[in-house]
Amino acid sequence: MINFIGNRRKAYLLSSILVVASLVSLVLFGLSLGIDFTGGTVLHLNLGEDFSMEEVESVLAEYEELAGATIQVVQGRDLDGDLADEGLVIKAPYIEEGRRNELMDSFRSHWPNLDPDDLRIESVGAVVGGELTRQALLSLAVATVLMVAYITFRFEFKFAIATIISLLHNIVIVIGVFSILQMEINLPFLAAILTIFGYSVNDTIVIIDRIRENIKHKRRSEYAAIVNESINQNLMRSINTSLTTLFVLIAMLIGFYYFIGSVDLVVFVIALIIGVVVGTYSSIFVASPLWLTLQDVQFRKVKRG
């Protein structure tokens, strides 16, 4: 039997290092927010022939509002997995429809074979981006409050506190990884965060439910051994569930990257993969040991009183 409780201080230290590193990165580097949050325009083009970055930049130089725009060359694949024509992704501040039409005319004059069927334009105004940001924060706040209310009703308040701290620990680390890597964040990332919330709490509740069943009619001095036994009883279930989920996510990542070519979906799956790994770790090493720590604090207060 693995002694998780005996090693909880090591787990707390590791978690503290990861959380602090994530917070430092967020303060120093921030997040690479996509147009869903900042507002802007993204153009996906298939020019239909060879091109150079210098040629593309010369076309964009005619438009002052595109100064500093990000240009990416993307390599697509067809359904057979074979390489398709190279495409172009331009990320810029918000462009009015009239100016977008002028820009497309400029591209057509340089590359007459530009395929209109492969043209995709995404535009989000700054006001809309700000509203999406507020809605994202509100969604996380509501999810947290509802989670505390449910776990308190179903179990007890200290279980709720331990669970929410471990969930926030997971979210901070996932966001911190994206801050360190400066991967662009759009709405699918928010969906991944909310999914991680639900996935992590499910695994945690299974363990704390086992703890609640095992501690019935037990003395306080036996709590540490019971918590450790409860974690071990659910250990293989947690690992097998997470591995099964990871296999599916890795298959999705390969499919999205090589066959669909959607950057947003790739980011979505990467966030889920990180969240599943961190969530499994926290449900075993953080949530339940943290509940025991809260119990120890309360017991010492009662004993002193």
Image: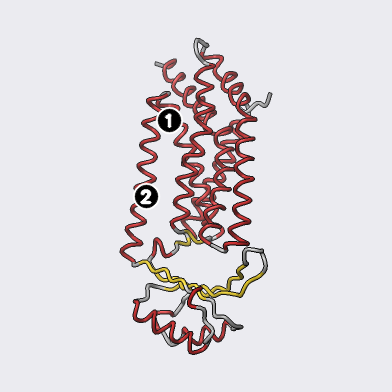
Rendering coords of residue 279 (x, y %):
55, 40
Q: Quadrant of the N terminus?
A: top right
The residue that label 1 is drawn on is 160
Q: Please determine whether, in this image, residue 192 is positioned above or below residue 297.
A: below
Report the side of 128 relative to 231 (left or right).
Answer: left
Q: Amino acid at mark 2?
A: Leu
Foreground residue, 227 or 126?
A: 126
Q: Residue at x 50, y 23 (%)?
A: 209
Q: Residue at x 51, y 78 (%)?
A: 115
Query: Where is residue 129, by image quadrant?
Result: bottom left
Disc on the earlier residue, 2 or 1: 2
Query: Where is residue 155, by image quadrant?
Result: top left
Foreground residue, 112 or 294?
A: 112
Q: Residues within 10 Å of mark 2 (few under 14, many from 20)?
A: few
Rendering coords of residue 168 (x, y %):
46, 41
Residue sitting at the far bottom: 109
Q: Amino acid at mark 1?
A: Ala
Foreground residue, 171 or 264?
A: 264
Rendering coords of residue 97 (x, y %):
35, 77
Q: Residues within 10 Å of mark 1 (few under 14, many from 20)?
A: many
* Element carrying mark 1: helix
Q: Residue at x 49, y 59 (%)?
A: 28
The residue that label 2 is drawn on is 137
Q: Residue at x 54, y 42 (%)?
A: 16
Q: Please determine whether, in this image, residue 278 is positioned above or below residue 4.
A: below
Q: Please determine whether, in this image, residue 27 is positioned above or below residue 39.
A: above
Q: How is the image coloured?
A: secondary structure
Q: CA distance from mark 2 to mark 1?
A: 20 Å
Rendering coords of residue 225 (x, y %):
60, 19
